[in-house]
Amino acid sequence: MFSHVFLGTNDFDTALRFYRPLMDALGIAARFCDASRPWAAWQSQPDPRPLLVLGHPYDRRPHEPGNGHMLALLADTRERVDQAYAVALAHGGRCEGPPGLRPHYHAHYYGCYFRDPAGNKLSVVCHRPPEA
């Protein structure tokens, strides 16, 4: 369905210090990083798409986070949700909802919510039941 998602930032270095450990915590591989542009991307496995791309807005105007926009990243276990949340907060993220069940979505929806240093809202979600 998606080719890529682009998240804007005004401070690429700060954003990179946030997203590198977050993507590592989720086991998502880096695809490229070009600080001269600046932009970076991470890719899904085993397919090369979709990509999560991070960088300065193309039109060179300042990035402004919106209300109502949210990117939800998929985690394969609840433990990865917990780990991603801890990493996000340790690297400048701001809590928008700690990890936990959200049964009003479905019985196994386990997720967390936070904002990156640029104000973009993200979620990390596991849709699987707990591992035995």
Image (cartoon, rainbow, N blue to C red):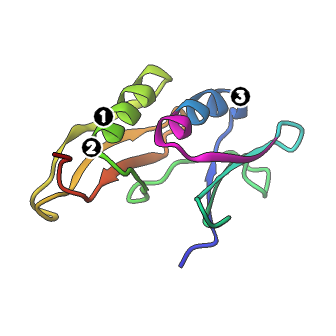
Q: Position of residue 46 (x, y in %)?
A: 60, 63
Q: Position of residue 115 (x, y in %)?
A: 42, 39
Assess whether mark 1 and mark 2 are in contact (beta carbons under 8 angstroms).
Answer: yes
Q: Amino acid at mark 1?
A: Asp
Find residue 13 and name its label: 3
Which of 69/131 is in front?
Answer: 131
The residue carrying mark 1 is: 82
Which of 8/107 is in front?
Answer: 107
Please tell me how many numbered marks the rendered image carries.
3
Crowd band around label 3 with a 10 angstrom C-alpha radius: few (<14), some (14–19), many (20+) = few
Residue at disc 3, secondary structure:
helix
The residue carrying mark 2 is: 78
| Placement of 112 over or under 2, stated as above or below | above
Q: CA distance from mark 3 to mark 2?
A: 29 Å
Residue at disc 1, secondary structure:
helix
Q: CA distance from mark 2 to mark 1?
A: 6 Å
